[in-house]
Amino acid sequence: MRFNPDNRQLGLIKVALFAICLLPLCRLLWATYTNDFGPNPVEFVQRWTGTWTINLLLITLCITPLRAMTQMHWLTRLRRMLGLFCFFYASLHFLSFIGFDHDFVIEDIAKDIFKRPFVTVGFAAFLLLIPLAATSNNWAIRQLGGRKWQELHRNIYLISILACVHYFWLVKATALLWPLAYSIGVALLLGWRIRERQRKAIPAPQFQNAKPLKFFKQKPE
Amino acid sequence: MLIRHTPHIPTSEITDPQVYAGRRDFIRTLALGLGASTLGLAHGAETRDGRSRRFDNLLSSPLSTIDDKLTPYQSMTTYGNFYEFGPDKDSPAKNAHRLRTQPWTLTVDGEVKAPKTFAIDDILKWAPLEERIYRMRCVEGWSAIVPWVGFPFSELLKRVEPTGNAKYVEFWSLADPEQMPYVRLPLLDWPYIEGLRLDEARHPLTILALGMYGEVMPKQNGAPLRLVVPWKYGFKGAKSIVRIRFVEKQPNTAWMKAGPDEYGFYSNVNPDVPHKRWSQANERRLGEFLKRKTLPFNGYADQVAGLYAGMDLRKNF
C-alpha cells in the first residue's frame, strides 16, 4: 500500500517538517542562551549555517528522484518549504560572514568577494538563490508561467555545483573528506536527472528502411 | 538439534561498579605516587580531574604580555592544530592521549662540538621555570593569550656548543605512527620540522615551553617539550620535540614543503603580507565574535624588528 496523505495529513506532515527544519536554528539559539559556542564562536556559527544550507539543498534535490522511485507524488508538495529553509540558512550563513567577518562594512565585503575565490563562488551561489526564493509562491508561478518558472528553478543545479566548489575551496587540502562526500551526493542527484532526461528523450523508433513515398513509378510523361 | 545457551553470569560474579571504579582510583594513585617519588616531577601525570600536574614556584617574567585577559584553559586545550593527531581543530584533544611522554629524550646534534641526548627530567632542572604570557597568532587568523611555562631557548645553547658553521636551528617533532595515528597519512611530509635562524633562536623571547597555565604541558599542546616564538605564526612553534639540529643551511620546513608560496621560512606575524588565500590584517581572539587588528610582529616589534633590519619582509615572509 502506497502512503497517500489527505490534505489534513499533509498539513500535519508540513508542520512537523517545519519544526524539524527549525532545529538547527534552535541549536544556535541554545548556544547563544548558554553562551556555549566552543573556542571559536564565529567558526562554529559559519560552519553550522553552511552545513545546514548544503544539507537542505541536497534534501531538496532528493525530492524528485524519491518521488519518481516511490510514486509518492505528494512529496513534491514539501519541496518549496525545504528550498526556502535552504535559503534561510544560506542567508544566516551570509549574514554571519558580512557581520562577524566584516562588521557590515560594504567596502571590506566587496574586497573580500573579489579577492578570495571561494567567497566569490559562495556569493554567486547566494545571489542565484535569491530569485528562486522570491518566485517560490503561487502568484509568481502564475505570473511567470510554468515553463519559465521551471527553467528559472533549474538554476538550483548550478547552485548545487557552486556550493560544492565553495566548500572544496575553503577547506585545507588535509580535510577534503566532507566536501568530497557532499560533491558525490550532488553528482548522484544531478546524474540521476541527466539519465532521466536522456531516457525520456529517446525518440520514437523510426522506420530505418523506409524509402520516400513515390506516387508514381515513373515521372508522368 | 540441541542448542546450548551460554549460562547467565550469576550476579555474584559481576564486579560492583564501585569496586571497579575504586580499582582504577587505586591504580591511578599508585601511578601518581610512584611517578612522583621516582621521577621527582611525575611528568605528564594527570590529576583526578583530568588536568595536568601543577608546577610550584614559577617565576613571573618581565617579558610577559599582561595587558590582555588569558584565553580560557578549556579553549586552548580543545582547539588547535597538531596534525600528527588529525587535521581537525578538535582532533588533538581527542587523540593525543595516545602520546607517551615518559620516558622522553631530546637529541641535540648537527653542527655542535659534541652531540648530546638529554632526558626530559633533566631538562626540567636546567633553569628556574618562568611563566611567560604571550600573544599567540595562528596563520589561519585566530589568536589567543597563553601563559606558557618554560625558559629561554638560550639555556640549551649554554649546554651544547654549536660550531662556527651553525647558522640555523632545526626542530624535529616526534613522528611515531604507533602513538600518532595521522602520521600514516600524507598530510605533511613527516616528521614535522620547523626552523629558526640562530639569532632568532637566541632571542630572549624564544622559549622552550614545558607547560602552560601553571601545569605540565597537555599532550594535545605539544607535551613534553615545545618551542614558542611569539612574534611568528603559531606553526613555527614545533610541538613534542625529540631532536634539535644545528645546521649551516636554511631548513626546508614541513610547511614550506607543503605550500612554498603560502608558508615562508620566516613567517613573522605581518598584517601587511596576506596569506595566498586570505588577508592577515585582522585576527579573531578565541571566544570573541568580532575581529581585531593584527599587530606587526604580533606586538613584539620593539623587541624583534631589529633582527630583520635591511630585509625585505615581503620577500622573506
Image: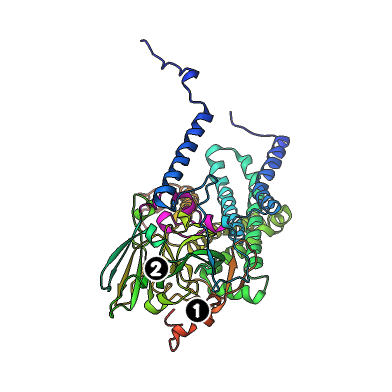
**Is any atom of residue B38 visible in this view?**
yes
Q: Is residue A92 left or right of residue B99?
A: right
Q: Secondary structure at mark 1?
A: loop
In the rendered image of this protein, does residue B26 appear above or below residue B75?
Answer: above
Q: Secondary structure at mark 2?
A: helix
Identify the amino acid type marked 1. Answer: Val
**Span colored in magenta:** B75-103
Q: Is residue B73 magenta?
A: no
Quick one: label 1, few (<14), some, or many (20+) residues within 10 Å?
Answer: some
Query: Which sits earlier in the primary sequence, circle 2 or circle 1?
Result: 2
Q: Residue flagged by tag 2: what amino acid is it?
A: Trp
Left of A34 or right of it: where is B101? Answer: left
Q: Which mark is residue B255?
A: 2
Residue furthest left as drawn: B114
Expressed as whole percent of the image width and height from the top left, the position of residue A84 reads 66, 53
| The C terminus of chain B sits in image quarter | bottom left
- Residue B259 in picture, x, y percent from top left: 39, 70
Percent position of residue B193, x then y: 36, 66
Chain containing mark 2: B
Q: Residue at x 54, y 70 (%)?
A: B61
* Most distant residue in the bottom direction: B310
Viewer-proximal residue, A34 or A210?
A34
Residue A203 shows up from this direction: no
Which residue was labeled with disc 1? B273
The residue located at (69%, 40%) in the rendering is: A16
Relative side of A185 to A144, left or right: left
Q: Position of residue B274 (x, y in %)?
A: 50, 76
Please report the residue visible at 41 percent of the width from the left and 76 percent of the height from the top. B202
